[in-house]
Image (spheres, rainbow, N blue to C red):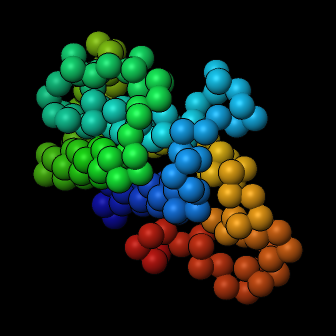
């Protein structure tokens, strides 16, 4: 089995959760703070942060430090002032960097997971760096879903098993399959 398959599957799962959540919120809610708390992150901030993180980590993943000198991480936590299309464009660029990096890892052969990469000058195996990134994406995907759910209110369509739907879901657990249908 391809060792990258589960990593690609999990990235695709969390990417899709964010995208499905974004579809359910109005443009005005992208920069909205939960309960008016100006210290919390907005959906736009989380998406911009993830986009910046993924671009930084996965541009030249195997050969350069994952914290690029051009990244302005602190600015990622300020309102990006982007509309939906600009935000989604940055999101797509970030995921293209991830896809290229994973293709580079695959091309590097079976020993690639044991290779060392650096993030903020700290050495990590490729496998550890990938697992760390998947966890980071999952963490922030959960934040986006939580915010989107709060803002969508009764219009929200469940991204997993809806309340009261466990029996029907158990009869056909299609959402437990990865994006590739497995």
State the image quarter where residue 121 is shown. Answer: top left
Is residue 93 or residue 166 the one in the foreground? Answer: 93
Q: Position of residue 130 (x, y in %)?
A: 37, 39
For the point 73% across and 79% down, the residue is 169
Q: How many marks?
A: 0
Q: Quadrant of the N terminus?
A: bottom left
Q: Is residue 174 above or below residue 159?
A: below
Q: Is residue 53 above or below residue 144?
A: above
Q: Position of residue 116 (x, y in %)?
A: 25, 27
Residue 51 visible within the image: yes
Q: Is residue 141 left or right of residue 112?
A: right
Q: Is residue 116 left or right of residue 164?
A: left
Q: Position of residue 139 (x, y in %)?
A: 57, 39
Residue 98 visible within the image: no
Q: Position of residue 2 (x, y in %)?
A: 31, 60
For the point 44% across and 55% down, the residue is 15
Q: Is residue 2 left or right of residue 31?
A: left
């Amino acid at each position: 089995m391809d060792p990258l398959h589960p990593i690609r599957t999990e990235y695709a799962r969390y990417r899709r959760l964010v995208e499905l959540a974004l579809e359910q919120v109005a443009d005005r809610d992208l920069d909205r703070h939960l309960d008016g708390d100006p210290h919390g992150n907005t959906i736009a901030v989380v998406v911009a942060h993830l986009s910046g993180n993924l671009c930084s980590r996965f541009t030249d993943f195997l050969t350069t430090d994952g914290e690029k000198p051009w990244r302005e991480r602190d600015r990622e936590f300020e309102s990006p002032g982007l509309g939906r299309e600009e935000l989604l464009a940055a999101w797509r660029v970030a995921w293209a960097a991830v896809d290229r990096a994973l293709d580079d890892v695959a091309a590097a052969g079976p020993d690639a997971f044991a290779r060392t990469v650096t993030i903020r000058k700290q050495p990590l195996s490729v496998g550890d760096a990938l697992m760390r990134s998947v966890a980071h994406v999952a963490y922030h995907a959960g934040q986006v879903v939580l915010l989107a759910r709060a803002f969508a209110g009764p219009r929200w369509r469940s991204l997993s098993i809806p309340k009261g739907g466990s029996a029907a879901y158990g009869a056909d657990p299609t959402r437990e399959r990865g994006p590739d249908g497995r």
